Amino acid sequence: MSKRLIFNGFSMNCVSHVFHGMWRHPDTKQTEFNELATWVELVKLLERGKFDALFMADVIGVDPSYEGGWDRYIEEAVQIPINDSSTLIAALIGATEQLGLNFTSSILQDHPFSFARRVSTLDHLSGGRIGWNIVTSVSHNAAQNFGFDRIVAHDERYKWAHEYLDVVYKLWEGSWDDDALVVDKLRGLYANPSGVHRIRHEGKRYRVLGPHLTTPSPQRVPVLYQAGASTAGRAFAAAHAEGTFIASQSPAGAQRLTQQVREKVRGFGRHDDDLLFIQGMSFVVGSTEEEARRLAREQDEYISLDGLAAHISRDLGVDLGLLDPDRPVDDLKIEGVQGLVRFFEDANPGVRPTVRNLISAYSQSGRIVGTPESIADQLEEWQRAGIDGVNVMYHRTPHSFARFIEHVTPVLQRRGLAQSEYAPGTLREKLFAGRGPRLNGRHPAARYRGAFRDEPAPAAIEAAQAES
Amino acid sequence: MSKRLIFNGFSMNCVSHVFHGMWRHPDTKQTEFNELATWVELVKLLERGKFDALFMADVIGVDPSYEGGWDRYIEEAVQIPINDSSTLIAALIGATEQLGLNFTSSILQDHPFSFARRVSTLDHLSGGRIGWNIVTSVSHNAAQNFGFDRIVAHDERYKWAHEYLDVVYKLWEGSWDDDALVVDKLRGLYANPSGVHRIRHEGKRYRVLGPHLTTPSPQRVPVLYQAGASTAGRAFAAAHAEGTFIASQSPAGAQRLTQQVREKVRGFGRHDDDLLFIQGMSFVVGSTEEEARRLAREQDEYISLDGLAAHISRDLGVDLGLLDPDRPVDDLKIEGVQGLVRFFEDANPGVRPTVRNLISAYSQSGRIVGTPESIADQLEEWQRAGIDGVNVMYHRTPHSFARFIEHVTPVLQRRGLAQSEYAPGTLREKLFAGRGPRLNGRHPAARYRGAFRDEPAPAAIEAAQAES
């Protein structure tokens, strides 16, 4: 029997995440994203469908990247407005019992001391069901909301991310010993001070004394995701992440990529299966192939090519709105579109893709249209190519998830490709069968266990303490 | 009939908030503060009792302020460990329908851009039930967790707080016009770009371009609380707050204080009733006076004088643990204990209070011991002295709240001193009868309404945008 795939419901705390224009459909609750009830309905559905987690993406800025401005993003709600994802995750803890709750937070947006406490609080309240998608933000506007003139240079951003992780690892793993907590009402001893440590972090961007203010949560460190597709991003994922998001155009592409990255994982002294590969995919399900294709065509009528173009322009850093839509793409030497070009050419042999073709292809890439059985066949192929799971993207919500769970999940479950029951324990234990709730000893965070038991005191800090 | 009093359940996301040592009692859930169920039980109880809100205090550091160290704080869980309060508030939204949810956040802990988005998200998800207690943090360790050697000087901290509020006011009130949101599925128009504005804040500590990433929430600005007791703190509350926390030792003291501060409120062009005074109080309820006194005595056996002394030492900035407990307090010239000294002397005429007496008096100040009728009588007296509401402090949780709600609330309701039903609308509408969901035009945030419609662009920002 195959190893089962992980399934996450992929969403964003906004109107329109990926398939822009779909919010106009009469049967989608995207415009109700401000309402708690919308999300409670979704997570209860995902939990009924034995999905592993809700996975919330995020951005923290809107750039004037399309048609020379930002108007189209606002008019079509292309990831703006967008609400905070960790707050939503917190609000959904009580509506779920088993579902993992993954959110996205950029190193730009929160100080690591506050962030570490917030995440520990989430992990406590949820019984260890929290995952964090680490991002560094590629938006100028995001940087401009936090004091910068423009985004911090790429390599510098990754150095920053390393320091950020260093701080939170120290707080989560090094500040409280396992035996610090006593909770003895009769002796009146709650915790043992000798087991609680300052971390005394002094780095380029942060100085953090500690101690961490919360007791060790079930996972201590949330399940760590990272999605960077650059060389530095892949190296970062290989070093730190337990799950990485990929958007390959084919099983063969996924196979090449997973093999490359797994080699890097080993290079960091970790094992192949310490990093899970989660492919982004969407589905249109019909009772026949013909019906599925019809539903896909009907759905495509709601897609906004301008909305998609605005999204792609932002991601590529090239304003497609200022280009002639009929111009062949390969004349333009745009970085980062090779996968999409190949995807178009495979579907349209002999045709030179134009800018317009590329935009249109975007809405179909990573999409499987078919019957439950044929979708299961294709997922099996992806699984053999080396992916560990799927972030299921919606066209409409909760409709897309409901269709998948009603029709595809049972077929996958029969084939052993989807779980039929949740494994016990924390999110980490559910994702990595046979392991414990905490990071294994090969992970870089593990080096901070017990690391602060006998730290000397920097003079400046002691002087201030003496005065306090 | 009297104007009704506001009642908040006062708590902290930790084991021991005020009455240290009580966590050792067999019938209190303080040690279960990491569990969501503990808090869900509490808020459902408060909502049944028609309490206005849960009010969560917070601190973000632990200082070596007692007996020359921090051991006692950790041993007796004196506000450490302590989890994030906004995360808890988020998790409680779904468990409540009417209850206000107030949390505390320091200007140290979050960048105002992130903070504003988080609060708007909370306000959306809760239908406008959010309040924010603005603090500046008086702990050296708090400062040391965020890059400083020691706390920022008092006046500088309040300047910082003013800038912090300026940024969030601009985002909440000035970034999205009331008519920006269209949500027209047929025209495919979600929002009107001409109604969404960058705020272009450039101050001493922050540079924030904007726009705010969320649409206007029901209240736009959460209900604003501030508790500073210094001159600068009271002025800050008079200028900005809608509710201020006081800890007077008697109705006469409350009358003096509220009159003083209300004068300052008028000085800022606001009205007397634009600021609510919320007195901190605890209650021991008996069916007879004798039973109430007996219950208080039994309860006092669990109080830890060391725990209290550690708490007071931190607040006063004087290590009481290094002083002779039998030394008279007035020899020591400690600032900030006058109220407590007077409280002790009133109860013990002719006795010169010692350090030990002072610590012990702390556990009894702000406490009313009596029958439901006599408690109601005393609350009526406090109300006539000018307070608008009470933050009910627990000795045990949820026990203390349950006793109050079962026995005292019905008496207060009969007298019109407590509400019997929730008023409709947002928290602000519930607290300020006859007003709307948003801040009135006298509040300093109101000046940012429509303020960014035609802002010119600072050159540095535009240059970066041109490159993006």
Image (tube, coloured by chain):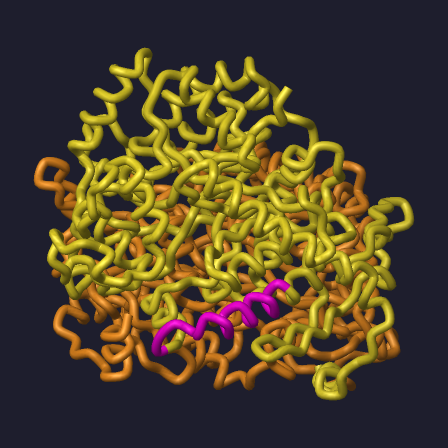
Chain colours: A yellow, B orange
Which SS does the magenta portion mostly show?
helix
Residue A52 in the image: above or below residue B349: above
Observer able to see residue B50: no
Q: Which residue is depicted at the point 59% across and 79% down?
A: A204
Residue B287 in the image: above or below residue B159: above
Q: Which residue is depicted at the point 84% across and 60% down?
A: A195
Task: Using the rendered view, name the quadrant where residue A161 is placed.
Answer: bottom right
- Position in image of residue A242 (x %, y %): 62, 47
Relative side of A408 to B189, left or right? right
Q: Which residue is depicted at the point 23% across and 84% down?
A: B459
Magenta highlight on residue A160 = yes
- Position in image of residue B12 (x %, y %): 61, 53
Q: Which residue is depicted at the point 75% across and 33% down?
A: A434
Residue B173 in the image: above or below residue B397: below
Observer able to see residue A418: yes
Front-lying residue, A342 or A22 = A342
Front-lying residue, B424 or A110 = A110
Which quarter shows the N terminus of chain B? top left
- Position in image of residue B466 (x %, y %): 23, 75
Which quarter shows the C terminus of chain B? bottom left
- Position in image of residue B10 (x %, y %): 56, 51
Q: Residue furthest front?
A: A350
> Which residues lie in the magenta part?
A149-165
Magenta highlight on residue A52 = no
Relative side of B466 to B48, left or right? left
Number of callouts: 0
Front-lying residue, A24 or B346 = A24
Q: Residue furthest left?
A: B187
Front-lying residue, A257 or B168 = A257
